[in-house]
Image (cartoon, rainbow, N blue to C red):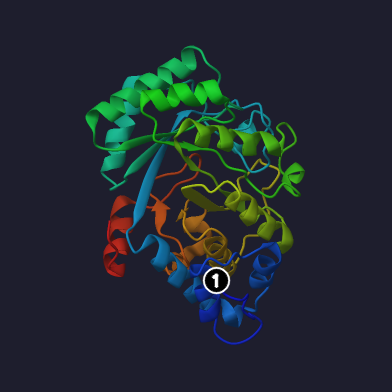
Amino acid sequence: MLATVPRVSEGPLTELAEFVINGGEVDVALAEQLLRLPLERAYDLMYAAFQVKRHFVGDALHRCGIVNIKSGNCGENCGFCAQSVFYQTAAGTPTYNLMSPDQMVQAAREATQYGSSNFGLVAAWKGIKKGPQLDQICEGIKRIQAEGKILPDVSLGVAGREEMQQLKEAGCVVYHHNLETSESYYTQVCTTRPWRENFDTVRYAKESGMEVCCGGIIGMGENLRQRAEFMKEVAALSPEHIPVNFLVSVHGTPLAGKAALEPMECLMALAVFRLTNPKSDIFVAGGRVQQLRQLQPFLFMAGANGMMVGNYLTTPGRTKEQDEELVRDLGLNG
């Protein structure tokens, strides 16, 4: 029998953790209520998320790295992205065509130095179709798999069932594709691609037998109701992995100048992401350095069990030594 939905307006939130652990579902209304808790309740919320994380995924640390295998000249108008053809000049984004398989393998070798278990090949375009480009990427995947040092993942935009099957047969382990934000807010961020296309792409990847990695960006101007909706929309796809990004304001993009979230607001959002997605790997990616600042170690207390290491697509990360020190000081495994 599922536990009764606990009151969260006052007192500690240990009953909330027990509710989720016993199979209770944090719906949109409850998620929004949690996001609206006053700042002095943040540590209660984080502790509940930590209990849920420890129960379902333990204390093992998940680390992943990425490389931009094709940069810039993307025809989409995502307002956060410096790789869009609409904003790349003002943002100063370097552009280059698709990497060769040899370059992909070399980048994967470098990622192993950060202790990453997975390595994502990321391309800036709307999506991938069957043809020479997909064949080239699949060759890179096969070579990375053959070396046996790191698991190859991809983030290639929208794709259909045939493309997913080819990637699966090449040895791709995880397909990454973000919803970005809630369906109700999405048109404020992107108008060149329907939100439903993102959702269906993740479904096709799951149908192929690959694991999926699906999340998005917090802090793009969405209200707390929309933030809660987004978390539950991700949960509807049951992704094995969820990347939580916090907006990094990039010069030249429409979201440049957007007010940054406070570190504690980021941690509270992360905690609610764990409570709405209790069984998934949740890792913090973009914005970890810029938005969490001195509170980065708290991300693991707030329900995350992983982080992206190395540099991101168009913004810098931390050094290998800094992240190794963080993990070591916290006594984390991995």
Identify which residue is drawn at 62% across, 45% down: 180
- The quarter holding residue 321 reads bottom left
Q: How far across and how far down the image is residue 33, in percent?
A: 68, 72
Is there any visible trace of residue 248 in the rendered image? no
Total numbered labels placed on residues in the image: 1
View extreme (front): residue: 1
For label 1, the SS is loop
Task: Examine the rendered structure and indicate whether residue 219 appears above or below residue 134.
Answer: below
Please state, as top left, top right, bottom left or bottom right, where the N terminus lies in the image: bottom right
Identify which residue is drawn at 62% across, 60% down: 260
From the viewer's side, name the closer residue of 226 and 58: 58
Residue denoted by label 1 = 1
Q: How far across and how far down the image is residue 229, in percent?
A: 69, 56
- The quarter holding residue 31 reads bottom right
Q: How far across and how far down the image is residue 158, in percent?
A: 59, 29
Task: Examine the rendered structure and indicate whether residue 4 appears above or below residue 182.
Answer: below
Task: Examine the rendered structure and indicate whether residue 150 appears above or below residue 264.
Answer: above
Q: Give left or right: position of 191 versus 4.
A: right
Is there any visible trace of residue 56 in the rendered image? yes
Q: Amino acid at mark 1?
A: Met
Q: How far across and how far down the image is residue 216, in percent?
A: 58, 48
Task: Examine the rendered structure and indicate whether residue 330 appears above or below residue 189.
Answer: below
